[in-house]
Each structure stands twice: as structure tokens, then as C-alpha cells.
Image (cartoon, grey):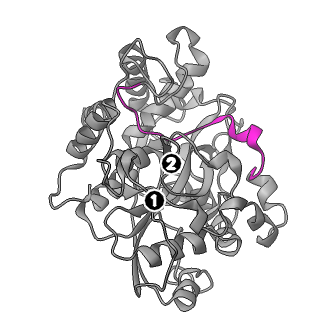
């Protein structure tokens, strides 16, 4: 969290979950938490600088590819010199925010509530963001980016965690996540999974669809019995895992080289792995999938509030949003971005406006003792326990 102290990731998660469990928020005078108010505006001249914390591919300045740059034009247009820091996991993002020094960040749903209830970010005034009206309605006012009717950021885009397979080895295209959990898998040692506590939700989703007696309604809202079943499934899976990946570059290398032939991936990883010819395919399994819907958030204590809002306005505008979506490989958040993407079929391929498709995607969220599926007769397992269980699984 952004304080004067730096706690470990697990300790941070535990502190935030305690707040989540009590449904608490910031004080009435706080600029963030559930009691704070959004910046009233108007947006004035920029302060001259902005520090951006982002997933790789979300704030490109030409250093990855000279032709891929929407940060430099932002600097030119606004006078806000941008410093960009990337992170590899949501836990890393929360930890970096805890250390301080960032004005805005792109946060996935498994980080957003930790940031909100941890008093790290402030609600946003959507009236100050020109393109907010063009954002797909299915991305607004979701339980991972809003609290008590307040939006805590501007939706960036969305994507599914796909099931990748190497067709040269996996000759029958899979249609279920079950192939990744089969202890007798012929692909043992070449199966991969995402290295994060949030991956427990992937096991829970599979069980939700295949074992209805467990009563799972939301893969991020698990009582102890449901949670134990998900962990048991992951323990069954572990012997066939060749690599858990958190670094997307390692996943790309593993798929490209063939050391990984089956498992969870992101579309951007597929794009890079297939850059010189298709070596990997991917499907959305019949159970659906977990996924991400990222949100641009503003740090509570930013000293660059005007530059921060200028960035929110810029990155959510159709031009920049189109560039990000096409480069990263995800559905854009701005409905007008589709007309600006060079591939005329892109938004159809990525289901940008297909809300029925997204009904089968369970976006990352932060587990808490208060069950986010609406149950009040039981306590759910909070994120701190997810983190402990994942660490125990990985180190066993």
C-alpha cells in the first residue's frame, strides 16, 4: 500500500482483507476509500509530470517498438512528462503502490478492491473524462471497479484467460479446462498455469460448472468447503505442471519453443508467440473462463491531479484506446475505438460489443470474508488465505 511503510505482499493482502471483511472505508474527509469524494475539477494546466504504473503494453512510448507510441503524443499535447513503470502481477502492482510515487495505474480486478479499501486510490469524477460516455456500459459500475455507487477509475479494456494448445502436439482441439487438470494427462510436464493466488478461481470455475453439488455461484466467493475443493483440484493438477508462469515473456518463450503445449495464456502472449507463424492456438472452453477488466485509477495522494486526469482522458479516448487494444490484443473499452483499428474484423474477433460473450467471463475480483456472491449465512475465504494457500501449494 502507499504509506510510509513497506509491508510484504501477503501482509498487505491481510490488512486490506480485514478492512474488506468489515465493509469499512476511508473517513469522511478522505479523498479515497468509500467515504471520499472525487476531484471536483475543473481540470487545469498540467503540473508537468506524471508517473504511470501499468501492465506491459498499456503505456507504450516507442521503446518496445518505435512505431508503437501513444505516450509521446500525450506528452506533446499536455506538457505532462510521463515516466512509465511496468509490473508483472497484480500483487506486484499493489506492493509498488504501497511504496508510493505513482500518480495513476492500470489495475485488474484482483487488485482494485485492495487499492480502494486500502485507501490508496480516490474515486474519479467521470464528468471530467471526455470519452466516458463512449465506454461500453458492461464495463461500468462493476463490483470490482465501483463501491457504494462511486466509480474508482476509467475502464481500459477486457480480455479472457484462454486455453492455449500446440496443435502439433495436442492434435485434438480441447474444449474444456478438464484437460489441464487430468492427473493422467499425456502432456504431463508441458502443462502451464498462471502463477498467482487468483488462479484458485480458475479451479473454482471448473468445479462450479462440473460439480454443481458444491454450490459455487462465483469463483471469487468460496466458503471453506468450496475453497478446499478448489485447492484439492490444484494439488491434483500440480504433478503435471511443467511451469507456473507470472512473467508473460517466459510464457511466450515456452509456447514458442514447445516446452509448454497446453495451459492458460493471454491473447498478447499468443500474438507474440505466433509473430513468425502460428505455433499455438487458443480456445474459450465450454466452462467459460476467468478474465480481466482493467481500470485506470488515480492515486489518493497524487500531486499531479491535473496531469492524472489528462492521462485518463487521453488513454480512454478512441485513438489511444484503439492503439492499445490492437497492440495488446484485447477488446477496447471505447465503442468508437473499433472504427479506428486497422483490422476491420478486430472488434468482432475480440467480442468488443458482444455482452453475451462476456457473460461467460468471470473477471478477476478480490475475495473477502463478506461473500461477494451475496450470501450472508457463511463467511467466505479472504484473499489473505488464498495467498497463503497458493504459497503452500507452490512450495510443497
The reply to whether the magenta stretch includes residue 84 is no
Query: How far across and how far down the image is residue 372, in percent?
Result: 47, 28
Q: Quadrant of the N terminus?
A: bottom left
Q: Which residue is mark 1?
A: 38
**Residue at horizontal 52 percent and vertical 74 percent from the top:** 42
Task: Determine whether label 1 and label 2 are within 8 Å by CB.
Answer: yes
Q: Is residue 292 visible?
A: yes
**Residue at horizontal 65 percent and vertical 28 percent from the top:** 287
Q: Is residue 16 above or below residue 238?
A: below
**Range of the magenta residues?**
351-370
Drawn side of residue 52 relative to residue 295, left or right: left
Q: Is residue 179 above or below residue 12?
A: above
Mark 1: few/some/many CA within 10 Å (<14, 14-19, 20+): some
Drawn side of residue 365 relative to residue 317, left or right: left
**Residue at horizontal 66 percent and vertical 71 percent from the top:** 317
The reply to whether the magenta stretch includes residue 355 is yes
Report the front residue among 70 and 277.
70
Query: How far across and how far down the image is residue 183, in percent?
Result: 47, 24
Q: Main secondary structure of the magenta part?
A: loop
Report the front residue among 367 and 170.
367
Q: Which residue is mark 2?
A: 150
Amino acid at each position: 500500500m502507499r504509506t510510509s511503510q513497506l509491508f510484504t505482499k501477503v501482509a498487505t493482502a491481510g490488512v486490506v482483507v480485514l478492512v474488506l471483511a468489515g465493509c469499512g472505508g476511508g473517513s469522511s474527509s478522505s479523498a479515497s476509500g468509500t467515504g471520499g469524494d472525487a476531484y471536483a475539477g475543473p481540470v487545469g494546466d498540467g503540473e508537468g509530470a506524471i508517473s504511470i504504473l501499468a501492465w506491459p503494453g498499456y503505456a507504450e512510448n516507442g521503446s518496445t517498438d518505435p512505431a508503437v507510441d501513444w505516450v509521446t503524443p500525450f506528452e506533446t499535447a499536455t506538457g505532462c512528462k510521463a515516466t512509465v513503470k511496468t509490473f508483472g502481477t497484480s500483487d506486484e502492482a499493489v506492493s509498488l503502490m504501497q511504496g508510493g510515487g505513482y500518480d495513476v495505474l492500470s489495475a485488474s480486478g484482483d487488485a482494485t478492491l485492495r487499492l480502494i479499501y486500502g485507501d490508496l486510490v480516490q474515486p474519479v469524477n467521470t464528468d471530467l473524462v471526455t470519452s466516458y460516455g463512449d465506454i461500453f456500459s458492461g464495463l461500468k459500475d462493476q463490483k470490482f471497479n465501483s463501491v457504494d455507487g462511486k466509480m474508482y477509475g476509467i475502464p481500459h479494456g477486457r480480455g479472457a484467460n484462454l486455453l492455449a494448445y500446440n496443435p502439433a502436439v495436442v492434435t485434438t482441439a480441447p474444449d474444456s479446462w478438464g484437460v489441464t487438470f487430468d492427473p493422467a494427462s499425456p502432456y504431463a510436464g508441458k502443462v502451464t498455469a498462471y502463477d498467482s493466488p487468483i488462479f484458485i478461481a480458475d479451479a473454482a470455475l471448473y468445479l462450479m460448472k462440473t460439480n454443481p453439488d458444491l454450490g459455487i455461484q462465483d469463483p471469487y466467493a468460496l466458503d471453506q468447503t468450496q475453497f478446499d475443493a478448489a485447492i484439492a483440484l490444484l494439488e491434483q493438477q500440480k504433478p503435471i505442471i511443467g511451469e507456473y508462469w507470472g512473467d508473460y515473456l517466459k510464457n511466450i518463450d515456452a509456447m514458442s519453443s514447445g516446452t509448454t503445449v497446453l495451459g492458460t495464456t493471454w491473447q498478447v502472449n499468443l500474438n507474440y508467440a505466433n509473430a513468425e507463424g502460428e505455433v499455438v492456438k487458443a480456445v474459450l472452453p465450454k466452462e467459460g473462463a476467468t478474465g480481466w477488466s482493467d481500470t485506470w485509477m488515480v492515486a489518493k495522494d497524487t500531486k499531479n491531479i491535473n496531469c492524472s486526469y489528462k492521462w485518463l482522458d487521453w488513454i480512454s479516448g478512441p485513438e489511444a484506446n484503439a492503439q492499445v487494444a490492437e497492440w495488446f490484443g484485447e477488446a477496447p473499452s471505447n465503442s468508437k475505438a473499433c472504427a479506428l483499428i486497422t483490422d476491420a474484423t478486430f472488434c468482432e474477433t475480440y467480442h468488443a460489443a458482444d455482452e453475451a460473450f462476456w457473460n461467460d467471463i468471470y473477471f478477476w475480483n478480490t475475495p473477502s470474508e463478506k461473500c461477494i456472491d451475496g450470501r450472508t449465512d457463511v463467511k467466505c475465504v479472504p484473499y489473505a488465505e488464498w495467498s497463503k494457500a497458493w504459497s503452500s501449494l507452490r512450495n510443497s
